[in-house]
Amino acid sequence: MNWLYQPWPWWLSGALIAAIMLLLVYFGRSFGFSSNLRTLCAMAGAGRHVKFFDFDWKSQIWNLMFMAGALVGGFIAAQFLTKDPAVALSPATVSELKAYGFSAPSAMQPAELFSWQAVASGTFWLLALGGFLVGFGARYAGGCTSGHAISGLSNLQWPSLLAVVGFFIGGLLMTHVFFAWIFK
């Protein structure tokens, strides 16, 4: 049972994702998590006020179950299958983060970004604004990174290829330009 506590090989994850994609294609479904927000808003009655949320949300219950399974699976993995909560980063990354003012990684979320001090300093609100912009961008692009990169590319959809290229450009800009500008 010691194998449960070790990182699984990349090829196993890839094979599992491919199997899930084949099942979704077989059943005429497409994968993506951002559509769950629309479904949850429709369930809460937002369709009475905004036409975008006025649709048959019951047809998307399967996707909500997929999301619930991902959340439960993540919880089980973090609570019961992880011996060391520290993130394994390369020494070069650790020294670069220290240059930005981050302490050595001891957990998944650095205290400099996810703590009451971060809320008071405004850093947390900057992250919240970024999260809102990511959500807006995902909806504007017609799906999230997982939906476009996994489902859209596997279905050879041209808009998904453009969206994934845009996601990577945005990620590279954030990592190499804006992150340094914000935290220096």
Image: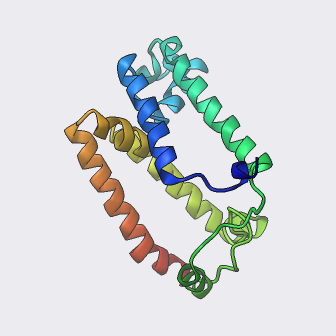
What is the number of callouts on the image? 0
Left or right: residue 83 compared with residue 90: right
Q: Is residue 104 in sight in this rendering? A: yes
Along the line of sight, the residue nearer the viewer: 29 or 88 = 88
Residue at x 30%, y 55% (from the top left corner): 166
- Identify the residue at horizontal 41%, vertical 76% (top origin): 176
What colouring method underlies this structural image? rainbow
The structure residue drawn at horizontal position 46% and vertical position 30%, both measured from the top left corner, is 20
Residue 140: x and y in percent read 35, 41
Compared with 77, 37 (above or below) is above
**In which quadrant of the rendered view does residue 141 lie?**
top left
Asked if one can make out residue 31 in the rendered structure from this viewpoint, the answer is: no
Question: Picture coordinates of residue 148 (x, y %)?
Answer: 35, 41
What is the residue that sits farthest to the left in this orientation? 158
Side of 140 where 93 appears, left or right: right
Q: Is residue 94 above or below residue 59?
A: below
Q: Is residue 107 left or right of residue 45?
A: right
Q: Quadrant of residue 100?
A: bottom right
Q: Position of residue 23 (x, y in %)?
A: 42, 23
Q: Position of residue 165 (x, y in %)?
A: 28, 54
Q: What residue sits 34% from the left and 59% below the top?
A: 168
On screen, residue 73 versus residue 11, left or right, reads: right
Name the foreground residue: 92 vs 10. 10
